Image: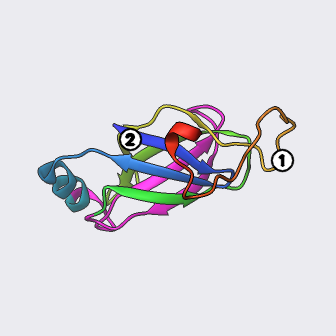
Amino acid sequence: AVLLVARDPHWLYAHWDLSDSQLREANQASASGSLVLRIRIGAPTSEVVVEQPVHPESRNWFIHVPQAGARYLGELGYYDSARSWVQVSTSSATLTPRDELSEETWVRFETLPFEMPMAQI
């Protein structure tokens, strides 16, 4: 399976858990010699907005995405010698945060002196 999580409004982190033999077999079957990470926006049948070849030995990748505050899905696979897409695994959806300041104002941050004892806090 592919784990896809938002790092920030425009970056996703993808991790796939394939055994060494699964990774080797997929890379050998790929026309380019490596897997490709495809990112869709919205739904599993929507258009691919990012298609990123990944290093043959990699098991994770950071992906830049165009839209903040959007729902993304990941798909790991490869193109075979006939240029047909072969899906290896998919992710659940993840949501990137909006690219603006939050309207929430109830949180308050404080800077505490380093030398202040925990009991006093």
Q: Along the horizontal axis of the image, is 32 left or right of 97?
A: left
Residue shown at the point (73%, 45%) measured from the top left: 109
Q: Along the horizontal axis of the image, is 37 left or right of 44?
A: left
Q: Quadrant of the N terminus?
A: top left
Residue 4 position in % (x across, y down): 47, 42
Few, some or many residues within 10 Å of mark 2 (<14, 14–19, 20+): many
- Tag 1 residue: 101
Instruction: Tell me the tag on residue 36.
Output: none
Residue 115 position in % (x across, y down): 54, 58
State the separation of the CA atoms marked 2 and 1. 30 Å
Residue shown at the point (28%, 65%) measured from the top left: 56
The magenta-colored residue range is 29-57
Q: Along the horizontal axis of the image, is 70 left or right of 54?
A: right
Amino acid on which disc 1 is placed: Leu
- Tag 2 residue: 2
Q: Which of the pair 13/47 is nearer the observer?
A: 13
